[in-house]
């Protein structure tokens, strides 16, 4: 697991690459208890912690993140585009615009924007989306604790919901007993990708450190040192591999 202390040491040593486990398996991320494709939602969490969700059976939404980051639509994400995407997501999390994320803003992120890191399985709810499209103007998701059979639906909120965490799922901070957090949905073994940037151990995530971590991530993903990333050249998350295996079995 990548810890903040490890990141601080990596920065001090010159920001060595941090992608773990990118060998034959082609992914980084913690092992999970359930490999049944039907138990996993179609979710990708970007290197900066932004979740992208799609319906079951739809293409894995890493492509949605890549399209967002590829501002000039040339099929490549260079370092400047990568950092711009990180900066944009940080600014979206920074509700009071003070250049740092405090505990309130982190709680908003963890409970309303990316509850996967707390152990929720989040799925796109198409029926709910159709019913409430006029209210939210966007795709809805449903959060269910612990996957199928482990609890009822805990909330139905738009991915870009407002800043009041009291409206989100009422869950304890430590609900994810596996400590996998975002790791199965991400390129990196980082259970909490936003607070991983608190390399000063102050309890506040400063934007400069958030972007420093993003720079380290770009270096890690750009294994061939091309200066840019392509969608085809990205590693696959553990969840992506699980879902692809399930698609092959259904054919």
Image (spheres, rainbow, N blue to C red):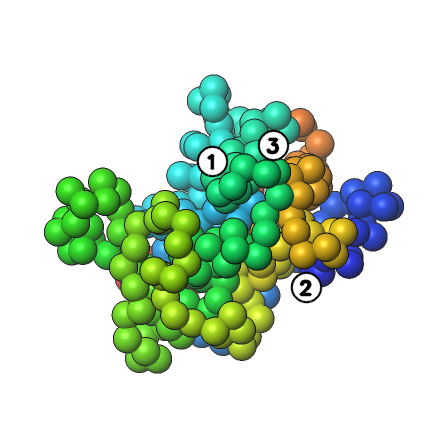
Give the crowd class for mark 3: few <14, some 14-19, many >=20 residues within 10 Å: many
At x 35%, y 48%, the residue is 161
At x 62%, y 59%, the residue is 189
Give the crowd class for mark 2: few <14, some 14-19, many >=20 residues within 10 Å: some
- For label 2, the SS is loop
Residue to which mark 3 is pinned: 83
Quadrant of residue 137 in the image?
top left
Compare marks 2 and 3 and give the one earlier in the sequence.
Answer: 2
Answer yes or no: do the residues labelled 2 and 1 have beta carbons within 8 Å? no
Residue 86 percent across, percent down from the top left:
56, 37
At x 48%, y 66%, the residue is 118
Question: Which residue is most to the left?
Answer: 131
CA gap, disc 2 and disc 3? 23 Å
Residue to which mark 2 is pinned: 1
Residue to which mark 1 is pinned: 66
Residue 125 vs residue 19: left or right?
left
Q: Relative to the observer, which residue lies in front, 120 or 203?
A: 203
Residue 159 percent across, percent down from the top left:
35, 49
Compare marks 2 and 1 and give the one earlier in the sequence.
Answer: 2
- For label 1, the SS is helix
Residue 198 vs residue 13: left or right?
left
* Residue 212 vertical placement versus 34 (above, below): above
Give the crowd class for mark 1: few <14, some 14-19, many >=20 residues within 10 Å: many
- For label 3, the SS is helix
């Amino acid at each position: 697991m990548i810890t903040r202390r490890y990141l601080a040491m990596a920065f001090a040593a010159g920001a060595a690459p941090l992608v773990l486990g990118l060998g034959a398996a082609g992914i980084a991320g913690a092992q999970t208890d359930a490999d049944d494709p039907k138990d996993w939602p179609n979710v990708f969490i970007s290197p900066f912690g932004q979740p992208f969700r799609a319906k079951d059976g739809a293409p894995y939404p890493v492509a949605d993140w890549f399209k967002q980051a590829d501002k000039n639509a040339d099929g490549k994400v260079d370092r400047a585009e990568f950092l711009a995407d990180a900066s944009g997501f940080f600014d979206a999390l920074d509700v009071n615009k003070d250049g740092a994320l405090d505990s309130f803003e982190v709680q908003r992120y963890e409970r309303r924007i990316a509850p996967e890191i707390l152990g929720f399985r989040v799925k796109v709810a198409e029926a709910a989306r159709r019913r409430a499209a006029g209210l939210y103007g966007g795709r809805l998701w449903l959060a269910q604790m612990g996957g199928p059979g482990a609890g009822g639906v805990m909330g139905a909120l738009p991915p870009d919901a407002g800043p009041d965490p009291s409206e989100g799922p009422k869950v304890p901070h430590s609900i994810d007993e596996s400590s996998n957090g975002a790791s199965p949905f991400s390129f990196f073994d980082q259970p909490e990708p936003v607070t991983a940037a608190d390399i000063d151990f102050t309890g506040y995530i400063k934007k400069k450190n958030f972007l420093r971590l993003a720079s380290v991530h770009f270096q890690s993903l750009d294994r061939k040192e091309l200066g840019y990333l392509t969608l085809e050249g990205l590693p696959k998350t553990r969840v992506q591999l699980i879902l692809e295996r399930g698609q092959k079995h259904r054919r």
